[in-house]
Amino acid sequence: MEIDKQINREIGVHGQQWNAMHEGYFSNSIIARPLIATISKYLSDSNTDVLVDLGGGTGFILLELIARGVIQNMVPVNLDYSAMQLDAMEKRGISCINCLISDFSRSNLATLDKRISFIMRSVLHYFGKDGLIPVLGHIRKQAKTGEMFIHQTACFESEIEAQCINVLYREMGTPKWYPTINELRESMSITSWQVIDICSAPPLKLSSVELGVRYGLDSQTLAKVCSRVMEEFGEINNVFQRGPDGFVAYLHYRICAAKAA
């Protein structure tokens, strides 16, 4: 399944509905604090002219940064493939680019003399196992040496935890893929990103009910998915657990601050 097809599969929860998904995780200021703090730490005193949120959705992170005065001297840009997400955004001076992350070029964003920094939250898994290094490489090619890329990405401490969640997503019929922390570090290094900081962000709780809505899966299909994961992994605390109304899974996030080497 191509990435544009993956995004279109979830179109039913885009727009204003997105802010309420997964208990409002992606529209909660408290949950976003570690990412906002990291962006502020590395960019507030930088010479960044243009700040680009890759896959910025409804613009929540950019709006939080604007409200806190973190990027007052920067031009904010939201680059997202979903027109519904961009249409739902409060503009507040934010430029919108309707484009796939794998397709954009630096010339779409700014003139050659401008300094660009990139941010991203919960997007890299859309590109799958085989697409992680190519998309990181593509972003690196659009960056000049020394420019920053700060992203919050779901990844796991252990191989068994990553495997469990990857089997879950495979059984739900999506090729989304989640690395271990070490795999993410290695992929960043291979694509000439120098990782300068990694810190934790709050985990995302995923109920089977919401996953069914998001991916168009009925209760019978979800029950089969649960059985398949239980057969291979059983319950893993704070990763995959069966409950009275189905199952609950958790994505564990790290915030990675990197510089173009």
Image (cartoon, rainbow, N blue to C red):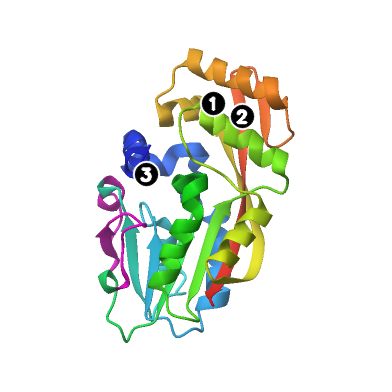
Q: Name the residue under label 3.
A: 3
Q: In this view, does 48 lie above or below 83?
A: below
Q: Earlier in the sequence, mark 3 or mark 1?
A: 3
Quarter of the picture containing the N terminus is top left
Q: Is mark 1 on a helix, strand or loop?
A: helix
**Secondary structure mostly taken by the magenta-highlighted segment of the chain:** loop
Determine whether, in the image, residue 151 is placed left or right of residue 5: right
The span from disc 2 to disc 1 (Cα, nearest Å) is 6 Å
Q: What element carries label 3?
A: helix
The span from disc 3 to disc 2 (Cα, nearest Å) is 25 Å
Q: Is residue 202 visible?
A: yes
Based on the picture, tell me whether residue 247 belongs to the magenta stretch: no
> Which residues make up the magenta segment?
84-106
Determine whether, in the image, residue 226 is placed left or right of residue 174: right
Q: What element carries label 2?
A: strand
**Residue 118 x %, y %:** 44, 68
Answer few, some or many: residues within 10 Å of disc 1's Cα (few below 14, many 20 plus, some between 14 and 19): many
Q: Earlier in the sequence, mark 2 or mark 1?
A: 1
Based on the picture, tell me whether residue 91 belongs to the magenta stretch: yes
**Residue 153 x %, y %:** 55, 54
The span from disc 3 to disc 1 (Cα, nearest Å) is 22 Å
Answer few, some or many: residues within 10 Å of disc 2's Cα (few below 14, many 20 plus, some between 14 and 19): some
Q: Mark 1 points at which residue?
A: 208
Type of amino acid at the residue the image marks with label 1: Ser
